[in-house]
Amino acid sequence: MVMKLEMKINKIINFSSVDGPGNRLVVFFQGCNLNCVYCHNPETIDYNQEGEFISVNQLFERIKKAEKYISGVTFSGGECSLQSDAIFEIGEILKKHGIKLMMDTNFTQPSIIYEKLSSCVDAFIVDMKAYNGNIHKALTGSANNQILKNIQSFYDKIYEVRVVVVPGYNDDFEEIQKILRFLYEIDENIFVKLIKFRPYGVRKPYNDIQIPEDHLMESFISLGHEIGLKNIYYK
Amino acid sequence: MSSKSIIKSKFLTYEQKVIALAREAENSLNVLNISEEVQNFRNEGIICDLFEGNAPYRPRYIVPDYNVFVKNGSSFLGLNPPEDLDELLNDLLILYKHVPSITSFPVFIGRLDELIDPYLENVDDQYAYRAIKRFLLHIDRTISDSFCHANIGPKYLRATKIILEVEKELQNTVPNLTIIIAEDSPKEMIVQALDSAMVASKPSFAHHEIFKGEFGPDYAIASCYNGLYIGGGSYTLTRLNLHFLAKKAKDTSDFLTRWLPLGVDLMIEYMDERVRFLVDESNFLESSFLVKEGLVDKNKFTAMFGMFGLAEAVNLFMSKDERFGHDDSADNLGEKIMDTLDSLVKQHSNPYLKGTNGKYLLHAQVGIDSDKESSPGCRIPIGEEPDILDHIQQASRFHKYFPSGVGDIFQFEPTYRDNIDALYDILKGSFNDGMRYISFYASDSDVVRISGYLVKKSEIEKLRKGQAVLKDTTELGLGAADNLKVMERKIRK
């Protein structure tokens, strides 16, 4: 018998209305390779800080209990793609049972990982933090070359690109314009959601950052329309 | 309240005073033959008739067949069958003022979309919207009691769509509104209804296949959420407090084999007597034009055996770690109690209950404003609600027992308005697991579902300040907020 893999997760939410289409069961994986200043659940960043191990079978049982109530499952985090072997295994089982799976990922891993996962993951929800590499580094502590490359490679599997607008980091016109133009050049129909930075759960001192005003967000939406993006909105 | 204090009250409206005085007059009579054992249980709060009064002179719930009225008009009211939309809506408003119930207001005002839709043929949407809006506004402002209930669905008619649009705009507490959802009801209709629920706290959702399996197609959801035959109703609703009854028992077995059978016997003795007086002596069925003209028929009447406080009854017999709603053995005991109650009630036959072959129908009673220690029906107590998935699946286990009504209520964060499909998934899942009746509302709405009826938070605050308010149910809402903690229901994120 083949050993089923284990994964380390922070928690499971049976019902979520904000992690993809319809009602979704969300699994938050433990551990992330980025260190975003606006992270809402920083306790999931350090792999060793929190979390519990769960086997593929145990996770599948949890999902089956909720199956009739959900449009699908979303793997989030932390960064779920760091545990891609286990995800592939549970993903194949879900696929066999007709249960849809999305991954909310930072797209930092080598393309080959997402290539493999594409066979069992229906769509990716992607966080694009910045276009400019320096801004990205300031926001997350890491470079973004691989992320941009993956967005280009897997755009037809992307459910939504999320851009958190963080005052003092990526909220200037030029940077947002670059992000939106980059996305437009990939696909004018790509779904783009601009999200206001919000301080809830965010670590000090970043929780002092101001929430962007509506008129700023609206001006970015207009900018997106001018560029030619067909599906852009903000929250 | 004495007659004098009713008359002098500063916060009752004139209408509320008249109704309260009528109740005082009724309660000055002693016409029911009540045994000492029954009276003791009533005094102890184990048996409660929900203020039905000492001399029942109209059925508690009357569910007229409005199709008969629309087809024939009414000779008693001097109305011909309506010929156009305006006549239909006007005639219905006339009729509503002559449909009594325990509250003195009608508890069922029809399957409105089916009644209205045939009259929309030569009417454009804008005209229909305005006419229906006037109609529903009239109902809210004149039927000043939130137990007044309208039904729509399961077909998505033009009228269904317009009624939902109007109700979302009006955000009124009356009428209470249920949409009946069938296997083949279109998703578009369900999504529109959910969208309305997240703004106006209505409609609620009834599982058609479950009700149809018990009543056939001709049933209505009346008052709180009570399944009853159209053209019939319920003579009475009395409730058994399982919690207080369980306090008398030594252990589970003593409860199931001694006290529960005794409680059921005394309940039925009392209900039989109420039904007997109403049918044999009050002359309602002999005198009402609703009977003479075929809007109601005694062959379609039943009566409702209510219960509440199951959670607390179970918890009395379990250890501290085994709470109802959180622990399998506690929930299993809950089911065992319900199985026993169900079979005890079914053993009894009352020839007056012609609609249901002499049987009383079980009803999960939603509680009254003064309840403090016993939760509604078989609900998990507010403050102890588990995760929503576990909550729905636990509640669904108990819905099968209650043809004449049971329901669970879930409060959501307003963010769900942005993803109504998520609520659609939850609704579908719960129906799949046997949920009979479910209600949703958003935590920031002014209109809130108290237990089985709607009240405005803003009206409760007025009443709290001693001001008179239009709806008599606002006072019940105020009590329920203070005692049943209904405003503290868990918010689902």
Image (cartoon, grey):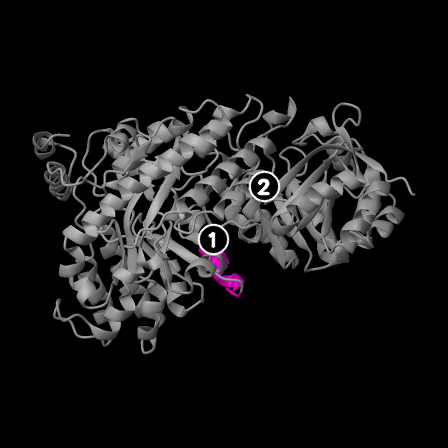
Residue A139: image x %, image y %? 72, 33
Give the quarter of the image for residue B109. Answer: bottom left
Badge 1 and badge 2 both on one subunit: yes
Answer few, some or many: residues within 10 Å of disc 2's Cα (few below 14, many 20 plus, some between 14 and 19): some
**Picture layout, residue B249 above or below residue A5:** above
Can you identify the residue that label 2 sits on?
B389
* Residue B192 is covered by the magenta coloring: yes
Q: CA distance from mark 1 to mark 2?
A: 18 Å
* Residue B249 is covered by the magenta coloring: no
Q: Nearer the viewer, residue B329 or B174?
A: B329
Residue B411: image x %, image y %? 47, 40
Magenta stretch, residue numbers: B184-195
**Picture layout, residue A98 above or below residue A64:** below
Residue occupying image coordinates x 67% and y 38%: A170
**Chain letter behind tag 1:** B
Q: Secondary structure at mark 2?
A: helix
Answer few, some or many: residues within 10 Å of disc 1's Cα (few below 14, many 20 plus, some between 14 and 19): many
Q: Nearer the viewer, residue B397 or B71?
A: B397
Residue B438: image x %, image y %? 46, 48
Q: Earlier in the sequence, mark 1 or mark 2?
A: 1
Residue occupying image coordinates x 65% and y 56%: A227
Type of the residue with mark 1? Leu
The quadrant in which the N terminus of chain B is found is: top left
Can you identify the residue that label 1 sits on?
B194
Q: Nearer the viewer, mark 1 or mark 2?
A: 2
Image position of B170 (left or right of B411)? left
Q: Secondary structure at mark 1?
A: helix
Image position of B13 (left or right of A90)? left
The quadrant in which the C terminus of chain B is found is: top right
